[in-house]
Amino acid sequence: MKKTKDLVKLALKIARKAHNGQFRHDNKTTYITHPIAVAKAVKAYFPKIYLGDVEPLVCAAYLHDVIEDTKLKRIDLLGTALPFQVIDLVCILTKGENQNYLEYLLKIKENNLARIVKIEDIKHNLGTLDPKKKTQRDKYLLALYILEH
């Protein structure tokens, strides 16, 4: 098995490649800035909790959107050196095609590691959201409430 720092580098490399050519909602900011920001927030959050090794959480933060928003699938991740724990977290963080948003959030809430990544994901999305998108803002705020309570 690879060293944990190598796994974090691998996760970032996979995320960079998968999101290559994608942009955030402003159509200017490269998409990879979002998973990088989420991973950074997860690292900052870690000292507040005790979960053991933070690297799987950081890997999942880098990869949290790859299955949902790119051509990569779970099977592709299984073909990498990433541990199953990371791939499992990424799958939990991936909203199913026929899954409603509340079911998705409740599934995430059952897994403390996935919950932490999703909270930081939502916080970053809120911080970069166009203020005119009130419906999206309200959806994120409700999701935060559900995940934090």
Image (cartoon, grey):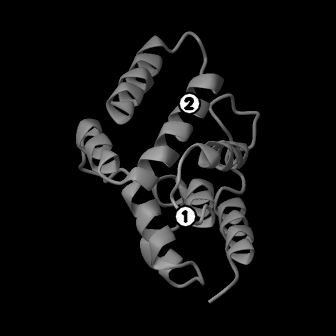
Classify 10 Å Cα crowding around label 1: few (below 14), some (14-19), many (20 and above): few
Res. 73 visible in picture: no
**Image position, residue 93 (x, y; %):** 42, 53
Q: Is residue 113 above or below residue 80?
A: above
Q: Residue at x 58, y 82 (%)?
A: 80
Label 1 residue SS: loop
Q: Quadrant of the N terminus?
A: bottom right
Classify 10 Å Cα crowding around label 2: few (below 14), some (14-19), many (20 and above): some
Amino acid under disc 2: Lys
Residue identified by numbered label 1: 52
**Image position, residue 8 (x, y; %):** 69, 68
Amino acid under disc 1: Gly
Q: Give the mark, 1 or 2, whose residue is nearer the N terminus.
A: 1
Q: Residue at x 57, y 78 (%)?
A: 82
Q: Nearer the viewer, residue 80 or 31?
A: 80
Q: Is residue 22 above or below residue 5?
A: above
Q: Is residue 31 above or below residue 72?
A: above
Res. 49 visible in picture: yes
Residue identified by numbered label 2: 123
Dot 1 and dot 2 residues touching (CB under 8 Å): no
**Image position, residue 68 (x, y; %):** 46, 54
Total marks shown come to 2
**Image position, residue 21 (x, y; %):** 72, 52
State left or right for residue 66 relative to residue 6: left
Label 2 residue SS: helix
Q: Residue at x 66, y 56 (%)?
A: 19
Q: Quadrant of the C terminus?
A: top left
Picture quadrant of residue 34? top right
Picture quadrant of residue 54? bottom right
